[in-house]
Image: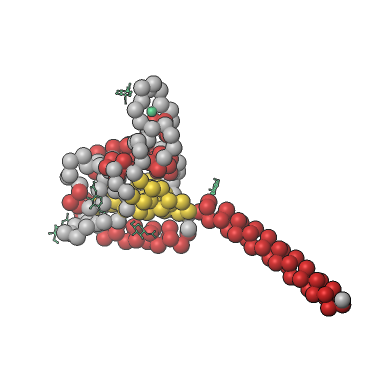
């Protein structure tokens, strides 16, 4: 009889501590998920429809607008650039998307410092936005080699990094499978900032002085 009682107590103690342990683990997991969620997200492409730049940066008054008014990956990218207050450093292989060029030009108008690095062989391709950016006073530097300047990342306000496979083209928005990681992880942001600064120095020409 006594042995059964001892065993009973022992089992209950085990059960209770197991329950406490599971609750503790669950709460720990939840709080770390919450923290991480804020820090990092991934935008996946293709989007079904191209987002309406007017709708996501001011307002769209076109009743027959054929662009998407529903939030998607491109609309989030629009907002990241639209919300920049200090700087936007773009390092991208191909740049033909007019909406993204518009956003950079608007950013310069708000007093944001905008710098663009791109591949020298992509500057003159059809639809390239590079000359338009330059004509609006945006500093653009290119590599000077037969190797590709193949990076595709943006640093916003020195605190947020967007990096992935995403070229700044319409085709990458609604056609290709692409990813764009968005993070405020300060260590990653710092590494990419250093790389941007290095390339910016390296690609300086006499004209840039
Ligand atoms: C409104 O949107 C339609 C469809 O996208 C377009 O054809 C038309 O030019 C737009 N109108 C204005 C005033 O922007
Ligand atoms: C690019 O590099 C070549 C040789 O490496 C040089 O002759 C040329 O002037 C450079 N062009 C620019 C724009 O720096
Ligand atoms: C940046 O994007 C490229 C292309 O998708 C990928 O190979 C690389 O791992 C990414 N870097 C980070 C730190 O996510
Ligand atoms: C996008 O970038 C890839 C390299 O990552 C390149 O091969 C491809 O031609 C680019 N897409 C367009 C539409 O230019
Ligand atoms: C580091 C970071 O991105 N923090 C953000 C977490 O989410 C809140 C609310 O959405 C933002 O205000 C912070 O900037
Ligand atoms: Zn619209």
Q: How many marks?
A: 0
**Nearer to us in this view, 6 or 132:** 6
Q: Which residue is most to the front?
A: 1
- What percent of the width, then of the height, locates residue 38? 53, 51
Q: Which residue is most to the bottom?
A: 3
Q: Which residue is most to the top?
A: 63
Q: Quadrant of the N terminus?
A: bottom right
Q: Is residue 119 visible?
A: yes
Identify the residue shown where x is 50% and y is 54%: 39
Identify the residue shown where x is 24% and y is 39%: 132
- What percent of the width, then of the height, locates residue 4? 82, 75
**Nearer to us in this view, 11 or 171:** 11
| Direction from residue 148 to residue 75 in the image, left or right | right
**Nearer to us in this view, 200 or 91:** 91
Q: How is the image coloured?
A: secondary structure
Identify the residue shown where x is 41% and y is 26%: 60
Query: Residue 192's image quarter?
Result: bottom left
Identify the residue shown where x is 34% and y is 44%: 46
- What percent of the width, then of the height, locates residue 194? 37, 61
- What percent of the width, then of the height, locates residue 21? 68, 65
Q: Which residue is most to the right?
A: 2
Query: Residue 52's image quarter?
Result: top left
| Direction from residue 68 to residue 169 in the image, left or right | left
Q: Is residue 153 visible?
A: no
């Amino acid at each position: 009889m006594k042995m059964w009682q001892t065993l009973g107590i022992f089992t209950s103690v085990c059960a209770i501590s197991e329950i406490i342990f599971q609750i503790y683990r669950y709460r720990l997991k939840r709080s770390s998920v919450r923290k991480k969620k804020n820090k990092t997200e991934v935008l996946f492409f293709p989007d079904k429809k191209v987002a309406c730049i007017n709708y996501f940066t001011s307002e769209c008054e076109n009743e027959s607008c054929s662009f998407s008014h529903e939030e998607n990956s491109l609309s989030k990218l629009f907002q990241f650039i639209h919300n920049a207050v200090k700087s936007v450093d773009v390092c991208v292989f191909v740049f033909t998307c007019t909406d993204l060029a518009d956003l950079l030009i608007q950013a310069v108008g708000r007093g944001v410092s905008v710098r663009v690095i791109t591949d020298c062989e992509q500057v003159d391709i059809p639809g390239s936005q590079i000359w338009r950016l330059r004509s609006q006073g945006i500093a653009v530097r290119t590599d000077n080699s037969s190797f590709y300047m193949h990076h595709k990342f943006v640093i916003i306000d020195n605190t947020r990094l967007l990096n992935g496979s995403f070229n700044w083209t319409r085709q990458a928005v609604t056609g290709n499978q692409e990813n764009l990681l968005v993070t405020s992880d300060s260590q990653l942001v710092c590494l990419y900032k250093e790389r941007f600064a290095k390339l910016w120095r390296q690609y300086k020409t006499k004209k840039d002085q």
